[in-house]
Amino acid sequence: MYVYAISAAWTAAAAAARHRDAAEQRAMAQGAAARATAPSSALLLLLLLLALLLHVEAMPRQGGRNATATWKDENEIGSLPRRSRANSSRLLFDDIFFGDFEDDRETGTSCDCAECGVINQEIRIVGGRPTGVNRYPWVVRLVYDGQFHCGGSLLNGDYVLTAAHCVRRLKRSKIRVILGDHDQYVTSDAPAIMRAVSLVIRHRNFDVNSYNHDIALLKLRKPVQFTKRIRPVCLPQAGLDPAGHLGTVVGWGRTEEGGQLPAVIQEVQVPILTLAECRASKYRASRITQNMMCAGRGTQDSCQGDSGGPLIVGTGEDGRNQVVGIVSWGVGCGRPGYPGVYTRVTRYLDWVKTNMRDSCVCVR
């Protein structure tokens, strides 16, 4: 009986051991299978980094060295607007290349007309085409989605004057204004600053077919402080007729039809025509409205990329420069019989003052 009990106990113990061994083998097999199907920590980290990179690549590129433009320059009326083409070179657009990049807070206005329209006289022009560094301290560049788009003129610490066709179909959040610039690919020559835009005011009657009322204002999100390199241009008196004067066009537009955009800001002097002379050119007389003016002779003309920039004249004893025209449109560049067409600023002084009523207006 005792032997039988020992034998039975031994048999039971052996069976239990075999059961435990089988259970352990099943557990080991399940663990191995789980380890085979579950990713390692390193693999999980790699997958997470890959997902993050894919997400970053899918975000809109509003700056940086790889910024590209998404807008197109529509040839809507046979005559070309003078803004930049979409195939122009990409720009360095990280805020580390510009000083005083603004935050989202709006501060008080900067209103000082004492030096409006004063050029930097001591900066000499070499060769007569490129300007000296910041010679015209009110000229600005408009950049859209990281790419040069148009020109403009600083009117005071808060507002920039430009052409309506320059801001047509643009998202305000992607517009940047570069002030105090000279060479758009080099930052060591001029300490340029950049501003976002809080408000786009385009003339309500702007006609994209005729380019009548081609005028707009941009309000800077943060005002700029005037320096030797950043100052406003004067607006003209209401009765000023610039016909017969020699005007100056300043901008980063092409220097010849079909040419490349220059790196350095350029200037060209153009004779300003009367309305009758403009209508007697090769343009249809009906195309030239009283809100427009013509300037140019021979190869002296504005071109694509100059759109929105100023046509200025220096009048009076003090020689202060006044913006009398806004580069608008034309047939080709420098073609005989086709002078450049500009928005006549004196026709819009009341419009400008009304839309800048929260700020000062510098008039000479």
Image: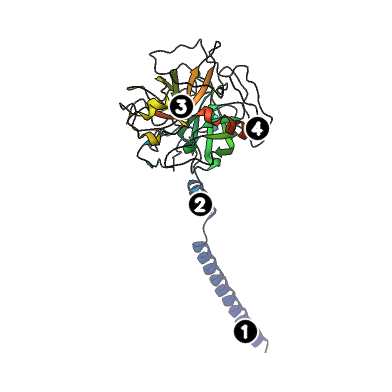
Amino acid type for the residue under numbered disc 3: Gln
Of tags 1 and 3, the one toward the viewer is: 3
At mark 3, the secondary structure is: loop
- Say which mark, if any, is on residue 357: 4
At mark 1, the secondary structure is: helix
Amino acid type for the residue under numbered disc 1: Ser
At mark 4, the secondary structure is: loop
Q: Is label 4 in contact with label 3 (beta carbons under 8 Å)?
A: no
Q: Name the residue under label 2.
A: 51
- Say which mark, if any, is on residue 7: 1
Q: In this view, does 48 lie to the left or right of 337?
A: right
Amino acid type for the residue under numbered disc 2: Ala
Mark 4 surroundings: few (<14), some (14-19) or many (≥20) residues within 10 A: few
Q: Mark 3 points at which residue?
A: 184
Q: In this view, does 158 lie to the left or right of 167?
A: right
The spot of residue 243 in percent (x, y) is 44, 21
At mark 2, the secondary structure is: helix
